[in-house]
Amino acid sequence: MSEEMFEKGLAMRRKVLGDAYVDSVLKGADEFSQPLQEYVTKYCWGDVWNRPGLELRTRSLLNLAMLAALNRPHELKIHLRGALNNGVSKQEISEVFLQVAAYCGAPAAMDAIRVAGELFRELGK
């Protein structure tokens, strides 16, 4: 994949997650983690997030459900910020986690609600 796809992915990653987060992640990358950062930026952000089939808001809602179901709290917190940036409301986030509880289990949803609550307190929301 080209440098153009990396730049396209970098722009989308910044749009959704914010410059501060992206700068810190890329600055913190070392020889070991750099290949994964490049992969994620090119393929996840450059290709998938830039596809025309879904709005960014919808992609964020999907990510919240999947990350909650997989119990990935670190990534969930990052994508909660992205979801808020993409116009998803706290009420909608709550509804996503209720759906997770029904289809993936209450423990996964409870962990997701805890992570979201911590973030909301940090953000004063």
Image (cartoon, helix red, strand yellow):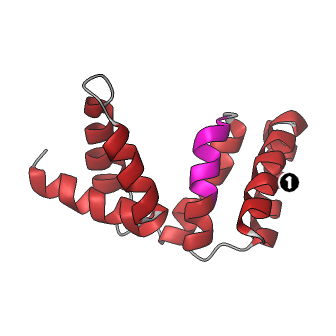
Q: Quadrant of the N terminus?
A: top left
Compared to residue 113, the image places residue 11 above or below, namely below
- State which quadrant residue 88 falls in: bottom right
Q: Residue at x 11, y 51 (%)?
A: 3
* Lateral position of residue 57 relative to residue 53, left or right: right
Q: Identify the residue under disc 1.
A: 98
Residue situated furthest top in the rendering = 32
Q: Is residue 18 above or below residue 39?
A: below
Q: Where's the C terminus, which quadrant? A: bottom right
Q: How many marks?
A: 1
Residue sitting farthest toward the bottom: 87
**Mark 1, secondary structure of its residue:** helix
* Callout 1 amino acid: Leu
In the rendering, at what x and y percent does residue 24 appear? 40, 49
Which residue shows up at 38% across the image and 64% down it?
14
The spot of residue 67 in percent (x, y) is 63, 42
Q: Main secondary structure of the magenta part?
A: helix
**Image height check: is 27 above or below 54?**
above
What span is colored magenta in the figure?
A: 72-80
> Can residue 57 be seen in this snapshot?
yes
Q: Is residue 77 magenta?
A: yes
Determine which quarter of the picture holds residue 33. top left
Q: Is residue 32 magenta?
A: no
Judged left or right of residue 34, residue 2 is left
- Identified at 48% across, 69% down, the residue is 56
